[in-house]
């Protein structure tokens, strides 16, 4: 598994590059690749986004420099902004386990493992894809696309990003739970800095363990 860091990159450019990597895996047997990056402020809408999930009118958001992009991943509306770690595992599942349920649970597991290294206890919620703290606050959203068993899109882990932008949407269509970040949840006794570069290294190691 290759791990590449695209740094801070425009969402549309990252989506274009994802398709290039997926094409290379499908047609040229390129290695599975985990992309890590951050995005400028953007709201993305998955395939099952319900009407009304974006509270603020899209033209007003764009006036503020926040794009609203419809994409082909699963899930509903979510937010990306600097300080959030976005991961795109672009994998050929036929090389390992051609099972989307297994793939999603493995991504959740890798994120849970990383959070544990910072003393953050997180878990799954039955029926709700993603990673949660105390079953109430989502710390990581997950939504993927899969074609010919090649996956694109992935996870968005709130590390130390501004969560205010989530107030502009109904995150993942869920109205009775909140959102949080590693910076908000890390216990006081933990001395490890919640630095996105350190988190990238930890998440890469967790993925290697889970997907080896």
Image (spheres, grey):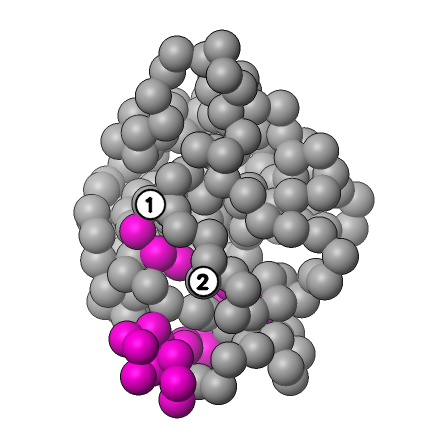
Residue 138, image quadrant: top right
Return the residue nearer the eye: 105 or 99. Answer: 105
Please state which of residues 210 and 85 is positioned toward the viewer in this rendering.
Answer: 85
202 left or right of 93 in image: left
Give the percent coordinates (x, y) of residue 46.
Answer: 54, 70
**Residue 100 in the image, given as x and y percentages of width and height:** 62, 50
Task: Between label 2 and label 1, give the one nearer the viewer.
Answer: 2
Please report the residue visible at 40 percent of the width from the left and 58 percent of the height from the top.
80
Residue at image point 28% right, 61% down: 40
Q: Which residues are magenta?
A: 59-82
Where does the N terminus fall, quadrant-wise?
top left
Q: How many marks?
A: 2
On the rendered structure, is 43 left or right of 141?
Answer: left
**Which residue is disc 2 drawn over?**
165
Residue under the image location 54 percent in, 57 percent down: 143
N-terminal of the pair, mark 2 or mark 1, is 1
Q: From this view, report whether residue 23 is shown above or below residue 4.
A: below
Q: Quadrant of residue 136?
A: top right
Q: Is residue 105 magenta?
A: no
Residue matched to label 1: 83
Looking at the picture, how far across and down is residue 67, in whole percent?
35, 76
**Picture coordinates of residue 156, whole percent (x, y):** 45, 49
> Is 15 drawn above or below residue 101 in the view shown?
below
Alpha-carbon neighbours of circle 1 within 10 Å: few (<14), some, or many (≥20)? many
Q: Is residue 99 above or below residue 135?
A: below
What's the residue at 40%, 51% (across, down)? Answer: 162
């Amino acid at each position: 598994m290759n791990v590449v860091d695209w740094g801070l990159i425009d969402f549309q450019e990252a989506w274009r590059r994802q398709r290039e990597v997926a094409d290379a895996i499908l047609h040229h047997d390129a290695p599975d690749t985990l992309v890590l990056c951050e995005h400028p402020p953007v709201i993305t809408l998955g395939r099952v986004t319900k009407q009304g999930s974006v509270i603020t009118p899209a033209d007003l958001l764009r006036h503020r420099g926040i794009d609203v992009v419809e994409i082909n991943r699963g899930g509903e509306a979510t937010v990306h902004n600097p300080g959030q770690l976005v991961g795109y595992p672009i994998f050929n599942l036929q090389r390992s386990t051609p099972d989307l349920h297994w793939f999603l649970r493995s991504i959740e597991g890798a994120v849970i493992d990383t959070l544990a290294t910072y003393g953050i206890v997180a878990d799954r919620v039955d029926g709700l894809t993603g990673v949660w703290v105390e079953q109430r606050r989502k710390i990581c959203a997950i939504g993927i696309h899969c074609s010919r068993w090649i996956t694109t899109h992935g996870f968005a882990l709130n590390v130390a990003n501004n969560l205010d932008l989530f107030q502009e949407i109904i995150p993942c269509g869920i109205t009775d739970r909140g959102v949080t970040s590693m910076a908000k949840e890390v216990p006081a006794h933990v001395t490890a800095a919640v630095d996105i570069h350190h988190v990238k290294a930890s998440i890469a190691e967790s993925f290697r363990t889970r997907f080896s």
